[in-house]
């Protein structure tokens, strides 16, 4: 197989893996296996799915530094767009299944509830990143592209805040996601980032 | 609506509970104002529900006997279409019981091994006849009733559930409250070995889970101590073996797996009020006009629903039980006392 064919296969595999949860949830809903409130099931799962996708996307840079494997870089845009897709599905679930497509209610809730405003800001940020993730926008934005896409970090913060606000009785699950986020962000601190390739070298030496 | 009135002189205690008579008489004295309202009372109507698809539990013999001898359909909703009984699998598979986890299906998955036999309840505080009572001794003197109530969760969903139990008022009367008793405080079991939610180091609830009612709310004939649902004993995840059901208040008031009932002078601080006083009050009466800070309470999703029919209905003041309970709150600002 050519190198190019191999990468296409890799990207296709990642695409299917990222699609799989959606198919699974859809199947569960169709089978009546998603409980008595399937809309809320999709709402919560798509929210968590979006957070997972963002965390995976942000893991790619440190993973590349650690391994120098090109495959991680090749799926970065795709996973970023999956984050947007899950988040959009999340908003759609809210509008369709929780509010029953009551537009007036959607309009008022989107500006009235602090935790929803925070979620909306995160979603707007994701849309901005998605819209500027193509080659044309990269060329057009030039040097400004990279700082713009660092918006992913505050977006992660907004999502964690949105999630935190919804917690009722136990912070355990939230703390896991917040810890994972903190670890991933820590790999961006210059002293840590500098050490990642050296760490890789050391691992290689041991082997 | 079916109201079966018997003259008090015709009654034997085993026929009709005094509270129901009280309730139906009150409705008549109110100039039939209650007709067509939220409830139908059918004294000794024999119509027994068909729960043939509900898995039978393993209740002790005494409880089985009491459940079977229940007065069926003592209180049923008026609008049997909108207030159709939720399937047993939904009522027992989708609920909040944070002692067993935060997900709606956690209780059903994890509560199975909760040991509910034997079970005793401490009744203490401002009572003359307190002590530790075996569940059987607590419940046996009262005739069980089946009551089909709307259950409105503070999270804006609701289900209609057929409970089996006894009026809390009867238990309180037998405890003989002193003149000082003004509130009733309830506690759930604390047992981290059996209750994984209590083992979490990130739990915000300070166990035990605590709830409270004003004495007149507790004595209200609609307030039920449930030991069963759907014709059988309570499944563990629904608060076995003994839980409260206060149908005009948000579901979190209806505390589960009760081990202690105290009559007290001071208004208790309930668990949710302690965690988030700006979100959850002591009264927690269902009220479409007072929003939760994070969502509207004007409507509710009646479950089970489906993807393209969220089954959103208007939430009613006091969950539709206003005719029966509104007078308890006459003159109170329910925005302040939410
Ligand atoms: C307009 C934008 C948004 C709206 C209206 C919205 C709405 C909601 C609602 C209603 C909940 C349930 C809260 C609860 O009842 O506990 C929720 C939870 C959540 N949302 Fe959002 N959200 C938005 C944006 C986002 C975005 C962009 C993300 C991240 C990709 C996200 C991730 C989550 C997560 C992780 C949860 C918690 C899920 C759980 O508790 O299992 N949300 N959101």
Image: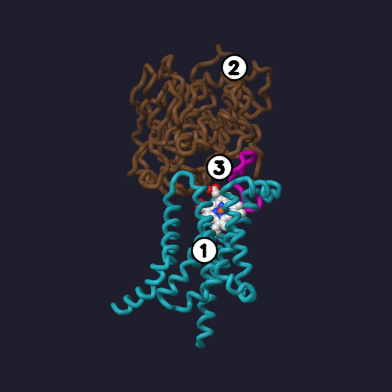
Chain colours: A cyan, B brown
**Pointer 3: what residue?**
B155
In this picture, which residue range is highlighted in magenta?
Answer: B294-310
- Confirm or reject: label 3 Cβ below 8 Å from ligand 1: yes
Circle 1: is it few (<14), some (14-19), or many (20+) Cα within 10 Å? many
- Chain to which mark 3 belongs: B
Question: What separation in Å lies between label 3 and label 2 (alpha carbons)?
Answer: 40 Å
Instruction: Tell which circle, 3 or 2, labels the residue nearer the N-terminal end.
Output: 2
> Which element is circle 2 on?
loop
- Confirm or reject: label 1 Cβ below 8 Å from ligand 1: yes
- Chain to which mark 1 belongs: A
**Pointer 1: what residue?**
A54
**Pointer 2: what residue?**
B6
Nearer mark to the viewer, of 1 and 2: 1
Nearer mark to the viewer, of 3 and 1: 1
Query: Quick check: B192 left or right of B44?
Result: left
Q: Nearer the viewer, residue B198 or B324?
A: B198
| A157 over A170 or under it: above or below | below
């Amino acid at each position: 197989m050519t190198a190019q064919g191999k990468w296409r296969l890799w990207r296709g595999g990642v695409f299917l893996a990222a699609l799989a949860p959606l198919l699974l949830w859809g199947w569960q809903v169709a089978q009546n296996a998603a409980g008595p409130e399937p809309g809320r099931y999709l709402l919560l799962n798509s929210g968590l799915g979006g957070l997972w996708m963002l965390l995976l996307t942000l893991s790619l840079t440190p993973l590349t530094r650690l391994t120098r494997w090109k495959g991680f870089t090749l799926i970065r845009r795709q996973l970023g767009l999956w984050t947007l897709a899950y988040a959009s599905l999340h908003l759609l679930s809210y509008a369709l299944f929780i509010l029953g497509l009551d537009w007036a209610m959607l309009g008022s809730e989107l500006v009235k509830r602090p935790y929803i405003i925070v979620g909306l800001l995160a979603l707007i940020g994701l849309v901005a990143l998605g819209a500027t993730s193509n080659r044309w926008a990269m060329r057009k934005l030039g040097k400004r592209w990279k700082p713009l896409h660092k918006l992913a970090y505050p977006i992660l913060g907004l999502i964690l805040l949105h999630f935190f606000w919804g917690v009722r009785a136990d912070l355990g699950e939230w703390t896991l996601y917040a810890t994972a986020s903190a670890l991933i962000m820590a790999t961006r601190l210059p002293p840590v980032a500098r050490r990642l390739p050296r760490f890789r070298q050391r691992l290689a030496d041991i082997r | 609506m079916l109201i079966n009135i018997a003259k008090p002189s015709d009654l034997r205690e085993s026929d009709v509970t005094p509270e129901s008579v009280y309730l139906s008489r009150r409705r008549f004295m109110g100039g039939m104002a209650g007709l067509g309202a939220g409830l139908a009372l059918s004294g000794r109507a024999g119509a027994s529900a068909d729960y043939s698809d509900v898995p039978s539990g393993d209740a002790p013999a005494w409880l089985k006997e009491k459940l079977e001898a229940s007065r069926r359909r003592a209180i049923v909703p008026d609008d049997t279409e909108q207030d159709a009984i939720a399937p047993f699998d939904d009522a027992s598979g989708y609920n909040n019981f944070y002692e067993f986890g935060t997900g709606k299906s956690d209780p059903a998955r994890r509560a199975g091994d909760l040991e509910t036999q034997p079970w005793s309840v401490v009744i203490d505080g401002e009572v003359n006849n307190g002590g530790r009572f075996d569940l059987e001794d607590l419940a046996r003197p009262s005739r069980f009733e089946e009551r089909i109530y709307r259950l409105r969760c503070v999270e804006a969903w609701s289900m209609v559930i057929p409970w089996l139990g006894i009026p809390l008022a009867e238990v309180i009367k037998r405890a003989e409250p002193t003149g000082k008793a003004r509130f009733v405080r309830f506690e759930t079991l604390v047992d981290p070995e059996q209750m994984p939610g209590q083992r979490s180091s990130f739990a915000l609830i300070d166990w035990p889970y605590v709830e409270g009612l004003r004495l007149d709310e507790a004595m209200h004939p609609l307030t039920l101590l449930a030991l069963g649902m759907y014709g059988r004993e309570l499944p563990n995840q629904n608060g076995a073996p003994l839980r409260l059901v206060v149908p005009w208040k948000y579901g979190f008031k209806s505390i589960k797996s009760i081990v202690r009932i105290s009559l007290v002078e001071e208004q208790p601080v309930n668990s949710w009020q302690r965690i988030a006083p700006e979100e959850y009050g002591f009264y927690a009466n269902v009220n479409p006009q007072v929003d939760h800070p994070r969502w509207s309470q004007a409507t509710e999703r009646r479950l089970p629903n489906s993807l393209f029919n969220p089954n959103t209905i208007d939430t009613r003041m006091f969950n539709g039980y206003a005719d029966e309970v509104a007078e308890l709150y006459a003159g109170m600002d329910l925005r302040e006392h939410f």
